[in-house]
Image (cartoon, rainbow, N blue to C red):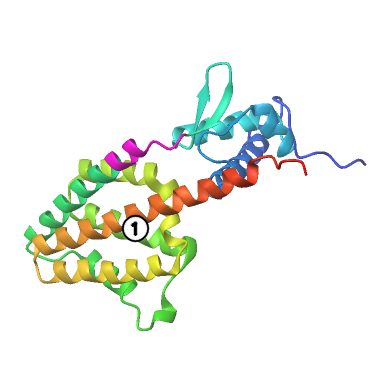
Amino acid sequence: MAKTRETETGNDPPRRRGSVADRVYEALKEDIFEFRLIPGDKFSEGDVATRLSASRTPVREALYRLQREGYVEVLFRSGWQVQPLDSRKVDELYDLRITLERAAVHKLCRQTTAPAVLRQLNAVWRPDHPSERAFGSTVRALDEHFHCDLVAAAGNQEMTRIHQEITERLRVIRRLDFTRSDRVDATYEEHAEILDALANNNPAEAAARLTAHIRASQAAVREITMEKIREAAAQQRPKKPD
């Protein structure tokens, strides 16, 4: 019996379409994360379907999912585009993130009992030996949890919700902060300093250290992002004939 293709038609069972849509989603997201697709790149559903050996139905499902998460946008009668890098919007999101996190640490220091999450965060960010530190995607996830857990522990559900939305919108660029070992080292050290200030019930110091930490990360991410985009653009540029 001839082997059937993994592609599917619009009449295929939803479960099978969903599995292919998930595969397409993960492939496109990785292309964006690894700068094989760079901000501003345009493409069609047909291009993706051909490259990933899938029909247009799951490709469209994957693209709409990526659109909801802010990674791509649909162009009127012109296909799709990787979300262009809007430096002003990114800076505004960082400003709002800092505002929320500073407010959160002040609320934490006003609590009569230190939340249990602080003990958990200390266990993560104060390993017994540097060799026990996380790296790569693991440290990125831990960093995200650090900031989200601090905000959640402050007890304001609307603040937590808005902060989570900002975190998701910045995720595609924030992940670059953990591609360099010096930035991973700095994250461990700076998180420990923030936790020290909270343990000493010093909201001003905690807020100041938190702000400096986020601004340093923001600057590093901007530098790495532009470097990655230049490298990707250079690789895509047609070579001149000899």
Pointer 1 residue:
145
With respect to residue 63, does 150 lie above or below? below
The residue shown at (41%, 53%) is 223
Residue 44: horizontal and vertical position, in percent? 64, 27
Residue 37: horizontal and vertical position, in percent? 58, 41
Give the quadrant of residue 8.
top right
The residue shown at (38%, 62%) is 142
Magenta stretch: includes residue 91: yes
- Segment colored magenta: 84-92
Residue at the right extreme, as displayed: 1
With respect to residue 155, does 179 lie above or below? below
Specify the amino acid type for callout 1. Answer: His
Residue 38: horizontal and vertical position, in percent? 54, 41
Residue 147: horizontal and vertical position, in percent? 28, 56
Magenta stretch: includes residue 129: no
> SS class of the residue under badge 1?
helix
Left or right: 168 in relation to 81:
left
Observer-nearest residue: 56 or 37? 37
Give the quadrant of residue 182.
bottom left
